[in-house]
Image (tube, rainbow, N blue to C red):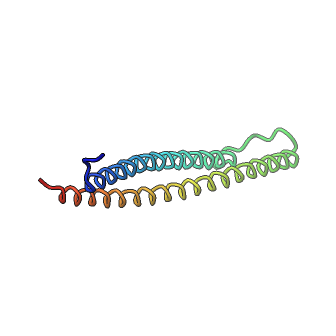
Amino acid sequence: MAGRSDRDLLLDAIMQERDAALDEARFERERAEQALKRNQTLRGDLTQLREQLRELLGRDGEAPPPAKEPDEDLAERLKLAMDTNWRLERGRVKLERQLEEARLSLNEEQERVKRLQRKLRALEGALRIAQRRDGP
């Protein structure tokens, strides 16, 4: 390394930092894409649960034929509907919580990618300056 100037060493250090920043930016972009896919999956799950709830609540206009005494059947249907509603509500709350976590994660990843992109631009600028100093 006896023949290497300070500029060469600085240039090498800047290039290494730039490469590391690029690798980190790629990694963070992949994480953000995964978070986005998870967010979309959760939205689909939430939509599916809402559809199931609509079906269970009989919004399609069909009522099951009464097979027992009206009061017994009504009480059973009410109990079943309440139980189903409770389970669906629990699932909805869980999915909404996961969706919010995915949104927060995605926002964090996007902010991290922006920071890394700014750092990368700064390193590229420093690299150009160092290369100009070494000019022909």
**Residue that protrudes farthest toward the top in the picture:** 67
Q: Nearer the viewer, residue 112 or 24?
A: 24
**Residue that protrudes farthest toward the front in the picture:** 2
Q: Nearer the viewer, residue 19 or 31?
A: 19
Q: Position of residue 80 (x, y in %)?
A: 79, 46
Residue 38 is left or right of residue 4, and the answer is: right
Q: Residue at x 82, y 49 (%)?
A: 79
Q: Nearer the viewer, residue 8 or 49?
A: 8
Instruction: Count up the numbered dots.
Output: 0
Q: Position of residue 10 (x, y in %)?
A: 30, 55
Q: Residue at x 62, y 55 (%)?
A: 96
Q: Position of residue 64 (x, y in %)?
A: 74, 41
**Residue that protrudes farthest toward the left in the picture:** 136
Residue 29 is left or right of residue 66, and the answer is: left
Q: Position of residue 85 (x, y in %)?
A: 73, 51
Q: Residue at x 55, y 49 (%)?
A: 43
Q: Residue at x 32, y 61 (%)?
A: 122
Residue 62 is left or right of residue 69, and the answer is: left
Residue 35 is left or right of residue 121, and the answer is: right
